[in-house]
Image: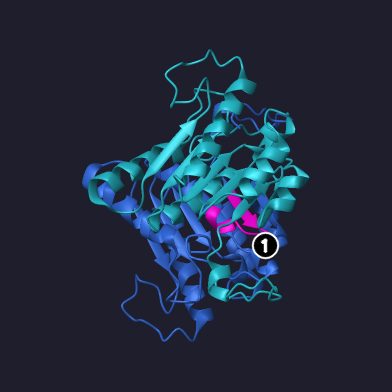
Chain colours: A blue, B cyan
Amino acid sequence: MPQGQPLSVPDDGLTTKQRRNRPLLAVHTGDGKGKSTAAFGLGLRGWNQGWNIGVFQFVKSAKWRIGEQTVFERLGRLHEETGEGGPVEWHKMGSGWSWTRKQGDGSDHAADAAQGWAEVKRRLAAQTHDLLILDEFTYLMEWGWVDVEDVVETLTQRPGFQHVVITGRRAHPALIEAADLVTEMTKIKHPMDAGQKGQRGIEW
Amino acid sequence: MPQGQPLSVPDDGLTTKQRRNRPLLAVHTGDGKGKSTAAFGLGLRGWNQGWNIGVFQFVKSAKWRIGEQTVFERLGRLHEETGEGGPVEWHKMGSGWSWTRKQGDGSDHAADAAQGWAEVKRRLAAQTHDLLILDEFTYLMEWGWVDVEDVVETLTQRPGFQHVVITGRRAHPALIEAADLVTEMTKIKHPMDAGQKGQRGIEW
């Protein structure tokens, strides 16, 4: 809520306006639903502000396509056609990233993941996007596919004004420490507990 | 993840397919961010499935307009123009609902809230929407502006195939009991704790 007031005013030499406009590093973690969904919801807000949106889905399945991808790609085309909102790029690891010609067979996830992170680093340095969503990125840190120190240093030292949202379970403590905003999604009750499988429109 | 398997198969006489296609009552609660944002993210998925989406924001401020409203209304127009996705209606309580000619002065929130719930009940009975998002609805139950038993009975007895997502802090135990899917968003860290105010594109 925008009416919310900070609990304390930090002694950081910044004005309220400067502080308000600081780019955020946000993390959505926990075992519950809504981590990615809320990240893409933020993407909607950003698109509406005219931001350049970059989504990087660090998922292993090439087949897996969620409704949000279709809608965001449609919003990106809408921007090209009418100038509304902002540009959108949506990249999915699957079996090799779309920016490489060489499509792997998807068996070397560690290499694909490292390549994805290298591309994100290049884009952060080039300030390509206003909002970057690194979906399911926490697992790369957990599995040692990227170097935790490198990730934290790159993110905290990123130039300019770039919001970054990272999703995934079991976020690394160093990432939580570095983040400005951390929300944990906790499962209280899930239909699978009652024997229900995932369904179209809800899970994808 | 759709690959997830239920922990147990209930003895309810339904086939897996019937069970998979049961409409959900979902609740996003807790003090953290992402409750509404994740609900609107589900709305994106539903829109992409061609669902008729109805959003009812039980918020008191008439001025408050979030980016999602603009984007969803745009998606609704896109549906009208091209047939893509599904139709969208977005209603906000503010100082009186948009479906009434009579605009109140916004001072009688309890009456506005009761009127909003009455309209939602009518639409549930008429099966107007495939997905209804009742944003910040938990407070109406907390404050006694709607009858808890009436809400629970109406929702659990709703006809046909209508998904309902309810957001807000401190969800009533009877609502949690009635829901199929409950996620709690917990704040681990928030920029306001570090003296930062809400900012455009992130909070609205």
Span colored in magenta? A25-37
Q: Which of A187 and B200 is in front in this view?
A: A187
Residue at point 63% right, 34% down?
A: B196
> Residue A177 appears at what percent x and percent y?
70, 53
The image quadrant of residue B11 is bottom right
Q: Name the residue under label 1.
A: A190
The image quadrant of residue B128 is top left
Q: Does the magenta stretch include residue A30?
A: yes
Horizontal arrangement in the rendering, residue A84 relative to residue B132 (left or right): left
Residue at point 54% right, 70% down?
A: B18
Whether residue A198 is visible, yes or no, is: no
Badge 1 amino acid: His
Horizontal arrangement in the rendering, residue B72 relative to residue A114 (left or right): left
Answer few, some or many: residues within 10 Å of disc 1's Cα (few below 14, many 20 plus, some between 14 and 19): some
Q: Which of A77 and A161 is in front in this view?
A: A77
Whether residue A110 is visible, yes or no, is: yes
The chain under label 1 reads: A
Whether residue B163 is situated above or below residue A199 in the rendered picture: above
Whether residue B64 is situated above or below residue B164 in the rendered picture: above
Q: Quadrant of the N terminus of chain A?
A: top right
> Residue A197 appears at what percent x and percent y?
59, 71
Q: Nearer the viewer, residue A182 or B109?
A: B109
Q: What element carries label 1?
A: loop
> Residue B56 appears at what percent x and percent y?
52, 36
Q: Is residue A85 magenta?
A: no
